[in-house]
Amino acid sequence: MSKFDWSGLMRAGIRDLGLRPAEFWALTPAELMFMLGQGGTDAPLSRARLQSLSESYPDTNGGASDG
């Protein structure tokens, strides 16, 4: 038994969101749920969290561009 209601998801994606079938099938379930307004419940990245991440994972190339 599938844990996804594929016919309901297809109806929502193709009919309600106006996706083409190829666009629908190219999405991950998480992307589709986000587009349907049922994902992304995490709070936006705060300035303090960004600072914490920057300190934990500093740039190692001295700020030079990749190209």
Image (tube, rainbow, N blue to C red):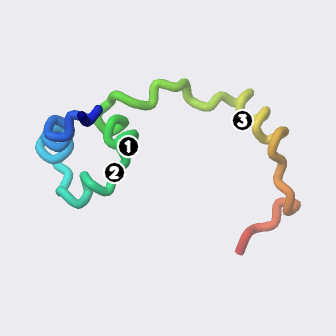
Q: Are marks 3 and 1 in contact (CB under 8 Å)?
A: no
Q: Is residue 26 visible?
A: yes
- Lower sequence index among marks 3 and 1: 1
Q: CA distance from mark 3 to mark 1?
A: 23 Å
Q: Is residue 61 left or right of residue 49?
A: right
In this picture, residue 43 sits left or right of residue 62 = left
Foreground mark, 3 or 1, reads: 1
Residue labelled with disc 3: 50
Tag 1: residue type?
Glu
Q: Position of residue 33 (x, y in %)?
A: 33, 35
Mark before the other along the chain sequence, 3 or 2: 2
Q: Which residue is at a point 77% across and 34% down the rendered structure image?
A: 51
**Secondary structure beneath disc 2?**
loop
* Cβ atoms at labels 3 and 2 below 8 Å apart: no
Residue at horizontal 21 percent and vertical 34 percent from the top:
5
Residue denoted by label 2: 27
The picture quadrant where one finds residue 37 is: top left
Query: Going by the image, does 47 lie left or right of 31?
Result: right
Q: Amino acid at mark 2?
A: Leu
- The answer to whether marks 2 and 1 mark residues whose Cβ atoms lie closer than 8 Å is yes
Please tell me how crowded label 2 is: few (under 14), some (14-19), or many (20+) other residues with Cα within 10 Å: few
In what element is the residue under mark 1? helix
Pinpoint residue 18: horizontal percent, then vertical percent.
16, 48
Q: CA distance from mark 2 to mark 1?
A: 6 Å
Disc 3 and disc 2: Cα gap in Å? 28 Å
User: Residue 14: where, in percent of width, then height?
Assistant: 15, 47
Q: Which mark is residue 31?
A: 1
